[in-house]
Amino acid sequence: MQMNNNNLRLLRRWCLGLALALCGPAQAQLATNIGIDVRAMSMAHAVTADPPGIMAIHFNPAGLAKLEGRRMDLQFLAVDMSVESRFSAPPGYNVFGFSDDPVVCADAPNDGSDVCRNFRTSTSTIEGVSLYVPIVNDVVDLPPGPLMAGPIPSFSIKPAGSKFTFATATYLPMAAGFYRQEGDPGNFMGRRVALNRITYLSPSVGYQINDELSIGASIGFSYQAVALETDFRSPNELLGFARIVDESLCAPFKGESNFALDIILFGICRPNEGLGPFKSLAAMDVAMDQRFSPSYNLGILWEPSDRFAWGAVWHAPTKVHMRGRYKISYSNAAQETINGVGSSPTGAIALAVLGLPSRIGATDAGLINMDLTMPAHFQTGIKFKPTERLQLNIDAVWVDYAEWDAFNFQFDSTNAALALARLFSPGSTSTSLYFPLQYQSTWNLAFGAEYALTDRLSLRAGYEPRASAIPDDRRAPLVPINEARYYSLGLGYRWDKDTEIDLAVATLRSRDDIPANSSCAANCTGINNLVYNPYAGLDIETQASITMFGMAFRTRF
């Protein structure tokens, strides 16, 4: 029975990998304030005290009160994303004596040796951008190259003599996704990923209390979707032991149904293909969405003089209830192992005692849902003008990622993966999966500058060092944006008294080193690691960059 329990614990690891994979795309929210407005982009989003036109809806709705008459903004964006992960074997790398991991071993496959003689550094890259398209309810892979978006419109109106300004905008608080080639070593943490949050309507109001003080509020009606396809494996000591049993103890009896052998070994020698530490165990495909997801922002702006202003904005936490479907495709080795154990009299009894199925098919499929709270976001800042032409902005940014202490996934019925996870994951049930995250809230500063070169032309620049919400022991290639640096440049040109044009270029860059056995969301070793570690024992380096180009056309009419 000990052998049976070991295999069950191994399969449980990729069950928890389901939870990690599901929560990974949601963590793209860690890229807060990316690509909302071109002027804000050029000043590292340090614009709470200097809201950028109609997109004050997002950055500080109190700034709407400064807009006069009828206005229209059109934004055009191009975004290029690059994600690269490198995997290498440290000295002494092995899993229960085996080191022929195809991710880092350059030896010929099935060369008869369990020990790798020629290690390599393996590199994973993304091929292009994937997006979840609401109308077709499916993921679309775009050709390699930048993602183009625009024109993205926004409108405002302030009746003559009124203290109220009304506005609405369409914008993309989140739009991220990628796909990798078949056989890419990074496919165990996302072969295809898509995350969208599209705010399609945002009725907003700014109110001018007096010449110095304004307040504002906005409501956002959004569509949110998450989709993921990924492979699973578990290079763990127990699977290494399972390979020893399969290749040594069971070799003379491979595929046989021997009653005495089944009684003693619980049917573990029945499978024609056994488990191993470097074999793929399953593949998973999941997609969830919520078509109506409301949120709200509150803002205040104080401008006692032309040379100084203070502002603050509160983005309230947003409750999201996503529903969709899932499909888990089990590998031949996983099927034969479970079914072989279940076909043995002693194995079937052991499975029944543990409440586990004695047989699994090629796939499990059904409906899935989860409740997710998008974290609260508070930002406050000042602008001041030391000279007539130079303006400096400084913002402080707080995001409540501690809200993501754990995720809970609900399934419409039980399945083999849940039955296994229930035994080893506190808080999980036969129809739910509980996954701890232990994220932490973050503070960081952002800096922007604007210099009026002429009465028509202004030059801009920004810098923002972003803190990571992910603890060191939870980092993984699936979420490559941790501590990051944001740099931006831009310019604004007043075409005439009613028309302005903004241009900007910006880049967000993040690098991370995850030494072997340092993160139990990627490469933990040891027999007791209870989370998904597809690169156990390997050194991992990640590098991610997001490069953005933008143009905004703003006019009064």
Image (cartoon, rainbow, N blue to C red):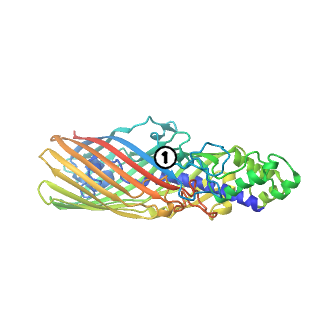
**At which x and y percent is residue 28?**
44, 52
Please, which residue is most extreme toward the front here?
117
Q: Where is residue 117 in the image (x, y as percent from the top left)?
A: 59, 50
Q: Which residue is label 1 attached to?
A: 123
Residue found 64% across the figure and 54% down from its top: 98
Describe residue 343's horizontal placement relative to residue 367 as left or right.
Answer: right
For the question of whether residue 435 can be seen, the reply is yes
Instruction: State left or right for residue 504 relative to residue 518.
Output: left
> Residue 548 vs residue 347: left or right?
left
Of 100 and 555, nearer the camera is: 100
Spot the residue most to the right: 260
Question: Toward the viewer: 6 or 453?
Answer: 6
Q: Which residue is drawn at 31% across and 54% down?
A: 59
Label 1 packing within 10 angstroms: few (<14), some (14-19), many (20+): some
- How many numbered marks are there? 1
Q: In which quarter of the image is the N terminus?
A: bottom right
Three-letter amino acid code at disc 1?
Answer: Thr
Query: Which secondary structure lies at badge 1?
Result: strand
Quadrant where the C terminus sits is: top left
At which x and y percent is residue 11? 67, 55
Question: Left or right of 112: which side holds 230?
Answer: left
- Which one is nearer the viewer's eye here, 531 or 391? 531
Determine if residue 197 is in view: no
